[in-house]
Image (spheres, rainbow, N blue to C red):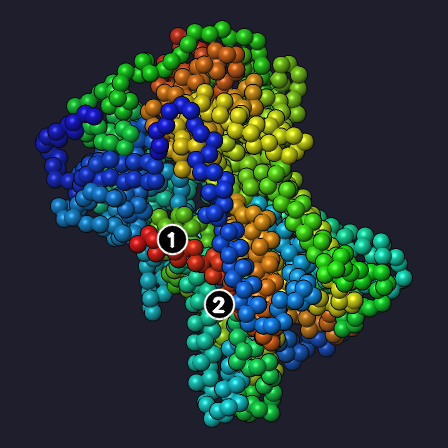
């Protein structure tokens, strides 16, 4: 672990933090999400919080906003120690957050979404709707959002919902504004407007915590940085004292090239062809091929339609057009069961909801799609199940007390190994991995990467959806970049650089 | 305005008007003001209970114990009156309201503090409350001649041409329209049911909000318990048996989403009126009252299918061109 | 997280050790205790014929409870079961007025059950509606049809051979119903615990999305479960109608609650995902013994329902209270 960089006084800016966290530790069963982290926020300054997925950024946001209570550590506001037993306490202390997923209420109006929990009250303590509407209009005007305050929220699109979330943050006289990947779902124009807003908040003397994966915007708007890695704070300082390479080094903790076990292997015949795949609202005009022994990366910003596309290929959602060919012949895939029968399997991004079945033991998780193999005329044969489960979990170097253990008691990385083992046991021809290393520890990450390379070497065709540039660059033979539901570019060989990926994903220098 | 025309409430008003027109075409006496006021009065207990149930369903719960709560409170009031006829009506009302509130609070506490699924809690308390009636009454009836004139007279007393029972229903509707629209608790019912996760983020206590919904539901059931027993001038173990289903039916027909967070008091009022009109019209048009149960059942099934169609969730809409049209 | 060498054992504790810690064993102890208490409380209890009579308190409900257990494990519920009995019984009663044979009556009972189950199944799995509201609706609808057909009338006049299902004895004190109950317990036990279908039911109950993503045809499985529940309600209707020898629209009123209580008491999680058929079988005996014992002590039926309501809540509340208490 690196020592925290000393924060020196910079000329012209405040050097006393409005909010300071120190020694914050937060553990969940089996996971240490935060380990003695510190974080300081200064009035009138933007602090960028960077780190890979699973580094603990979301957890610290939840601690800051009172949704989670740390096991240990100190929270200070203006030098006074304080605690946030509930979210309300944090709000009252002037801390407000624009969360990654919109935490809004579809059935309520725009004005109410802005003011819920602190609506203006009139006579008898009743909610004063005219005042609420007026105040909402004022705030919306301040951020140039042309929305009717009395409109039900459910009638707004994503970008407008985001504006409501921002308006909500401004409705309390917040001293600390937390923005958790605020630009992830926004268009370039909307992003520019957001930057202006950030500048305005700064000039009003508010402290801003800005969480982002995009280095260009961090360097553009942030004054300070804090880097998290594996639940620890590994560096902090002034943006003027750091460059991109240094931030990446802090985030990843080692040189990027060395951790990816990319083996040299031959790419064989085409296995999967996707032609003219379309969906009414999620993606359109998707054409690509996948060959044996190939790792095809899918890169894009969060919400670019990659997972939606993969789930359509896997038969979860029904596409409105297009077809899938396996080995050149049409495959009718209307359900995951059909996809599995055709040799296509999908390791989903949401491990807890879609991947592992918590409550069932490891061996039953592994054999679930392969029961027809292990059973005899529909009757279970436990010995066969244990045999199959053992074979694949040991290949993946699973760490568990026994195969009869509940998957829910495993660490994230080991759960992911179980999910991958489950799919390999079906002996697939195409394996789709959606953010396969999101939120898992470094050790498991390396194991998953090594295994992916081994699979490709054995002739399996692999699709890897990932938002992590080092992973995409390190693992893929070829990369398809998606933007707003369309294929923005297909990149291979020498053109595979972080710059080209980011440019195509964000639509910079390309026709929108 | 155009939004209202497309709403569930407008559709229900149209259905009710059409239903009344249809009945009136053969039996014009049905839509005379005096008869309509009789129908409203007859539907008032349903309206009272349905309001409470609406709040409960808004918070993603369900209260199947309301009819048993009504019956137990009614029996206690009737027995008190029979043994001590001197107890003034305001005291009886206070007892009914507090008994109902306590029974609602028991449901609410079990749901809030022990996180027991509401369906299990209220199925259980439904039989317990109903069983207690038998224990305290020994299975005996309290008949009209045992009740005092003041006791049975209260719900029938006419004020400005309407019986007290109708006025109480009207006041309750008005009061809860206000509570829903203008109090933080009223808005919290929507927030907690619509997006419990987000509710936590905004500092709302999901369990406590559900608790209050159960308390209100129980209070209204208790109040209605006295009114019911006094109006029909009889109390026995099985009064209002199965009434909880009619109450849920009124809510579901009124467009209250069983998934929580969506629906209005006006919708519930209309749903209850629809059922009340059907019930009162059956004997008029010569259909056996035994049809009532099957009609409420079909109405629930049709309404819940309709609700689901209306609220089908759309994806997150990634394609730019789709955003405008969706 | 436990760090272990590459070899992972199949199991840590033996199946026998696990059994000893299970809910079923605790429940069995309760059943034995009630049995002893009953035999001490009433001299009439320990009599083969009395005990045989006692089984009728639970055999019909337990048949439905087996199917309901699977349904609840899969995360759904069917509150219309008692109304299905009413409708199936009414259908059989109506047919009996035309002097049809016993076989036809049985087919009508089973057929009505299957149709009702399919109706629930289509609404829940085909249209994606919440099962709790759907079956509250069909609970009124099915019984409502019985009321339309029967009003305050009674169907009687079942053929004498029809009485065998509810009143016949296979051997000595062993009734036909008890044999059917035992056979169904074995069949459902095998279905849930020993087949791929049963595994799918558990997977769906623990995580329906995960099960779908694992290639399980979730909607088909759930539809079959509704069908099974309807079927078992139809079979229970045959037994009950045969035993009573008459049909009123109020037949089996409130049974849905007792069936759900039996399932929950048997250790099935009301939230889905866990539970066992042996548990439900023991729960059936416990409820039957309690009802019978209280009956011998002349406690009226409605008071017993208080116990059942308390039992339902206590069974779920006590483990949670225990956990909270341990947490402090």
Asked whether B104 or A116 is in front, the reply is: B104
Could you tell me which chain the residue with mark 1 belongs to? C
Q: Residue at x 69, y 66 (%)?
A: C49
* Mark 2 surroundings within 10 Å by alpha-carbon count, few (fewer than 14), some (14 through 19), many (20 or more): many
Q: Residue at x 25, y 50 (%)?
A: A84
Where is residue A111 shown, x and y percent of the image?
39, 52
At horizontal 52% and vertical 15% (from top left) the residue drawn is A460
Q: Which residue is mark 1?
A: C323
Q: Residue at x 44, y 67 (%)?
A: B106
Residue A443 percent across, percent down from the top left: 34, 24
Q: Is residue B98 left or right of residue C3?
A: right
Q: Judging from the image, what secondary structure is the residue with disc 2 in? A: helix
In contact (CB < 8 Å): disc 2 and disc 1: no
Residue C242 in sight in this render: yes
Q: Is residue B36 above or below residue A39?
A: below
The alpha-carbon separation of the residues under discs 2 and 1 comes to 30 Å
Q: Is residue B36 above or below residue C101?
A: below
Disc 1 on helix, strand or loop?
helix
Q: Position of residue A171 (x, y in %)?
A: 30, 50
Local crowd at mark 1 within 10 Å, few (<14), some, or many (≥20)? few
State which quadrant residue A12 falls in: top left
What residue occupies the far right of the structure in this picture? C99
Image location (x, y in percent) of residue A165: 36, 44
Q: Nearer the viewer, mark 2 or mark 1?
A: 1
Q: Which residue is mark 2?
A: B217
Res B269 quadrant in image? bottom right
């Amino acid at each position: 672990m690196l020592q925290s960089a000393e924060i020196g006084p910079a000329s012209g800016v405040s050097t006393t933090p409005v909010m300071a966290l120190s020694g914050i530790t937060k553990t969940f069963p089996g996971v240490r999400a935060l380990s003695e982290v510190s974080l300081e926020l200064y009035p009138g300054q933007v602090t960028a919080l960077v780190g890979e997925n699973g580094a603990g950024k979301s957890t610290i946001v939840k601690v800051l906003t009172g949704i989670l209570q740390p096991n240990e550590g100190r929270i200070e506001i203006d030098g006074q120690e304080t605690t946030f037993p509930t979210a309300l306490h944090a709000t009252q202390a002037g801390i407000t957050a624009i969360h990654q997923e919109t935490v809004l209420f579809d059935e309520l109006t725009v004005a109410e979404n802005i003011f819920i929990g602190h609506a203006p009250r009139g006579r008898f303590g009743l909610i004063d709707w005219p005042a609420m509407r007026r105040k909402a209009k004022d705030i919306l005007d301040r951020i140039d959002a042309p929305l009717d305050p009395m409109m039900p929220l459910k009638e707004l699109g994503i970008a407008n919902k985001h504006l409501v979330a921002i308006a909500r943050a401004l409705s309390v006289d917040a001293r600390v504004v937390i923005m958790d990947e605020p630009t992830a779902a926004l268009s370039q124009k909307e992003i520019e407007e957001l930057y202006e807003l950030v500048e305005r908040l700064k000039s009003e003397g508010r402290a801003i915590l800005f969480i982002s994966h995009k280095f260009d915007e961090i360097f553009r708007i942030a004054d300070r940085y804090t880097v998290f890695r594996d639940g620890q704070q590994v560096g902090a300082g002034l943006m003027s004292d750091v460059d991109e390479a240094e931030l990446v080094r802090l985030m990843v903790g080692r040189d990027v090239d060395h951790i990816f076990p990319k083996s040299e292997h031959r790419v064989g015949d085409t296995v999967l062809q996707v032609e003219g795949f379309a969906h009414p609202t999620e993606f359109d005009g998707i054409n690509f091929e996948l060959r044996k022994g190939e790792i095809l990366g899918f890169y894009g910003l969060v919400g670019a339609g990659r997972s939606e596309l993969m789930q359509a290929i896997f038969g979860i959602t029904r596409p409105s057009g297009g077809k899938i060919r396996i080995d050149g012949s049409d495959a009718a895939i209307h359900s995951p069961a059909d996809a599995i029968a055709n040799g296509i399997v999908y390791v989903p991004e949401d491990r807890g909801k879609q991947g592992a079945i918590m409550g069932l033991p490891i061996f039953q998780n592994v054999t679930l799609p392969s029961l027809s193999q292990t059973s005899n005329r529909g009757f279970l044969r436990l010995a066969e199940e244990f045999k199959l489960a053992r074979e694949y979990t040991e290949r993946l170097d699973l760490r568990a007390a026994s195969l009869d253990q509940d998957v829910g008691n495993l660490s994230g990385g080991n759960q992911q190994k179980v999910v991958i083992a489950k799919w390999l046991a079906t002996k697939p021809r195409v394996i789709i991995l959606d953010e396969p290393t999101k939120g898992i520890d470094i050790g498991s990450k390396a194991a998953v990467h090594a295994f992916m390379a081994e699979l490709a070497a054995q002739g399996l065709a692999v699709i890897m959806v990932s938002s992590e540039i080092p992973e995409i660059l390190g693992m893929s033979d070829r990369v398809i970049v998606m933007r707003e539901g369309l294929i923005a570019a297909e990149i291979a060989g020498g053109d595979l650089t972080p710059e080209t990926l980011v440019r195509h994903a964000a639509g910079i220098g390309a026709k929108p | 305005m155009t939004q209202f025309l497309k709403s569930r409430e407008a559709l229900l008003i149209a259905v009710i008007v059409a239903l009344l027109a249809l009945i009136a075409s053969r039996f014009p006496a049905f839509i005379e003001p005096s008869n309509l006021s009789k129908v409203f009065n007859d539907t008032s207990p349903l309206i009272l209970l349905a309001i409470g149930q609406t709040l409960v369903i808004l918070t993603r719960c369900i209260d199947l114990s309301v009819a048993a709560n009504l019956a137990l409170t009614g029996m206690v009031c009737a027995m008190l009156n029979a043994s001590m006829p001197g107890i003034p009506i305001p005291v009886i009302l206070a007892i009914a309201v507090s008994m109902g509130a306590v029974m609602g609070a028991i449901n609410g506490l079990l749901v809030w503090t022990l996180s027991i699924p509401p369906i299990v809690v209220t199925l259980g308390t439904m039989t317990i409350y109903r069983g207690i009636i038998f224990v305290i009454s020994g299975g005996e009836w309290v008949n009209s001649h045992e009740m005092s004139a003041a006791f049975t007279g209260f719900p029938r007393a006419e004020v400005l041409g309407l019986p007290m029972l109708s006025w109480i229903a009207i006041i309750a509707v008005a009061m809860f329209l206000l509570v829903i629209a203008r109090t933080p608790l009223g808005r919290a019912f929507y927030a907690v049911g619509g997006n419990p996760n987000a509710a936590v983020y905004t500092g709302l206590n999901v369990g406590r909000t559900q608790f209050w919904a159960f308390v209100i539901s129980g209070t209204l059931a208790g109040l209605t318990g006295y009114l019911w027993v006094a109006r029909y001038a009889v109390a026995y173990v099985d009064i209002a048996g199965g009434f909880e289903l009619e109450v849920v039916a009124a809510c579901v027909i009124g467009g209250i989403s069983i998934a929580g967070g969506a629906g209005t008091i006006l919708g519930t009022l209309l749903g209850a009126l629809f059922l009340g009109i059907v019930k009162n019209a059956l004997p008029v048009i010569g259909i056996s009252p035994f049809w009532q149960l099957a009609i409420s059942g079909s109405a629930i099934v049709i309404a819940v299918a309709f609700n689901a169609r209306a609220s089908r969730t759309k994806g997150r809409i990634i394609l730019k061109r789709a955003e405008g049209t969706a | 997280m436990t760090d272990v060498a590459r070899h992972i054992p199949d199991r840590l504790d033996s199946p026998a050790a696990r059994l000893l810690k299970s809910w079923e064993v605790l429940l069995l102890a309760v059943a034995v205790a009630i049995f002893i208490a009953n035999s001490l409380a009433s001299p009439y209890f320990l009599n083969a014929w009395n005990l045989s009579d006692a089984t009728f308190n639970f055999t019909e409900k337990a048949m439905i409870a087996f199917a309901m257990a699977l349904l609840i494990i899969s995360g759904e519920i069917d509150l219309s079961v008692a109304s299905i009995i009413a409708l199936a019984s009414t259908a059989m009663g109506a047919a009996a007025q035309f002097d049809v044979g016993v076989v036809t009556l049985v087919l009508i009972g089973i057929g009505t059950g299957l149709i009702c189950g399919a109706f629930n199944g289509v609404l829940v799995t085909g249209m994606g509606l919440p099962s709790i509201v759907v079956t509250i609706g069909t609970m009124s609808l099915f019984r409502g049809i019985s009321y339309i057909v029967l009003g305050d009338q009674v169907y009687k006049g079942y053929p004498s051979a029809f009485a065998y299902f509810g009143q016949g004895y296979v051997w000595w004190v062993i009734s036909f119903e008890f044999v059917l109950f035992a056979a169904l317990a074995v069949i459902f036990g095998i279905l849930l615990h020993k087949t791929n279908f049963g595994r799918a039911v558990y997977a769906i109950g623990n995580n329906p999305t995960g099960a779908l993503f694992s290639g399980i045809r979730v909607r088909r499985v759930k539809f079959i479960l509704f069908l099974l529940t309807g079927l078992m309600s139809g079979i229970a209707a045959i037994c009950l109608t045969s035993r009573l020898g008459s049909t009123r629209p109020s037949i089996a009123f409130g049974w849905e609650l007792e069936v759900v209580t039996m399932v929950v008491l048997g250790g099935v999680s009301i939230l889905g995902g866990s539970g066992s058929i042996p548990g439900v079988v023991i729960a059936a005996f416990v409820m039957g013994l309690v009802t019978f014992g209280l009956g011998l002590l002349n406690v009226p039926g409605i008071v017993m329902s208080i116990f059942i309501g308390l039992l339902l809540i206590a069974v779920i509340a006590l483990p949670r209270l225990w956990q909270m208490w341990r947490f402090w």
